[in-house]
């Protein structure tokens, strides 16, 4: 690529998205971050310097995505890390929150793909966020994990549909310490700091692989679980029931 890269990170006001914004800015890219809250966006973008931008956009609102893209595009990469999560037992689940998880995570990723494709330079990257939680359904995972499994499928289908105009990538993080996981009441195995996660993602996106999955010590056991005969897999995951 020639010239300075321009990257739009939707979900850039917190957690992994904010760490990615900093990591890309340190590499010399121009970063534009979006989320719903302008004040939180400003807090992340201000220390990065005046070349970088912040613009409010809601992934559930196509028009807000379109107008942000019209102001700041075209981009070399569009990264959608925005997501929401509401852990707990299915019988205690709040219906409105469950529907918001589907709208934000799954439909939001679809919306960004629809809008973003028209605002990417030729061969630019569209980066969707799955999760280790998508590899095999675990107790208490429910709708969040289901949206992430849906995003994996979405990314696979877009990868072929949009190539070579758009280079679709999938990020599959294990546990990362962010406001999203601060709501978990269990011990999170192999948890990483957001800066570490951002470094791994940046390295992966600069490489050629479709999926950037980490850390291996969590991903590989889950992948093994997913190929075991179901009765055996379920007997193992029963131990995780709270
Ligand atoms: N942390 C982990 O352990 C982990 C593990 C696996 C996968 N992931 C995935 O990694 C990604 C980043 O997670 P994180 O832990 O960094 O989350 P986070 O700290 O909670 O950040 C979520 C970001 O999404 C934005 N957002 C939420 N709803 C939005 C909406 N409707 N429109 C636009 N922006 C919205 C938030 O800003 P506003 O609320 O201000 O809009 C915030 O910037 C997510 O896709 C998550 O599912 C995380």
Image (cartoon, rainbow, N blue to C red):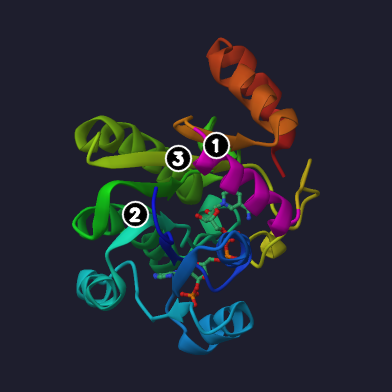
The residues colored magenta run 193-207
Q: Is residue 51 above or below residue 110?
A: below
Structural crowding at the residue carrying mark 3, measured as other residues with C-alpha within 10 Å and reported as few (<14), some (14–19) or many (≥20): many
Q: What element carries label 3?
A: strand
Query: Marks 2/1: CA distance?
Result: 17 Å
The residue furthest top is: 229
State if disc 3 and disc 1 touch (CB < 8 Å).
yes
Relative to 106, 136 lies left or right: right
The answer to which quarter of the image holds residue 227 is top right
Label disc, if present, on residue 109 of the rendered structure: 2
Circle 3 sits on which residue?
170
Circle 1 sits on which residue?
212
Camera sees residue 5: yes
First along the sequence among labels 2 and 1: 2
First along the sequence among labels 1 and 3: 3
Residue located 53% across and 60% down the image: 85
Q: Is residue 140 above or below residue 82?
A: above
Q: Which of marks 2 and 1 is in front?
A: 1
Q: Main secondary structure of the magenta part?
A: helix
Residue located 43% across and 38% down the image: 149
Q: What element carries label 2?
A: helix
Instruction: Give 107 or 80, whichever is nearer the viewer.
Output: 80
Q: Is residue 8 above or below residue 71?
A: above
């Amino acid at each position: 690529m020639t010239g300075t890269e321009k990257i739009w990170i939707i979900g850039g006001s917190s957690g992994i998205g904010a760490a990615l914004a900093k990591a890309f800015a340190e590499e010399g890219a121009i970063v534009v971050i979006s989320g719903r809250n302008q004040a939180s966006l400003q807090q992340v973008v201000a220390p990065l310097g005046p070349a970088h931008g912040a613009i409010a956009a809601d992934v559930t609102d196509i028009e807000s995505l379109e107008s942000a893209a019209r102001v700041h595009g075209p981009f070399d990469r569009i990264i959608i890390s925005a997501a929401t999560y509401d852990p707990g037992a299915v019988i205690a689940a709040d219906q409105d929150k469950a529907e918001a998880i589907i709208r934000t995570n799954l439909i939001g990723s679809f919306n960004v793909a629809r809008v973003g494709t028209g605002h990417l330079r030729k061969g630019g990257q569209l980066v969707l966020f799955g999760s280790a939680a998508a590899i095999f359904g675990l107790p208490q995972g429910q709708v969040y994990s289901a949206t992430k499994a849906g995003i994996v499928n979405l990314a696979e289908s877009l990868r072929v549909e949009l190539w070579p105009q758009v280079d679709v990538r999938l990020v599959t993080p294990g546990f990362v310490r962010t406001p999203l996981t601060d709501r978990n009441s269990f011990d999170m195995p192999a948890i990483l700091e957001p800066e570490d996660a951002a470094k791994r993602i940046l390295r992966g996106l600069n490489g050629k692989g479709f999926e950037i999955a980490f850390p291996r010590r969590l991903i590989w056991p889950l992948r093994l679980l997913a190929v075991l005969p179901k009765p055996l897999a379920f007997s193992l995951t029963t131990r995780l029931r709270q």
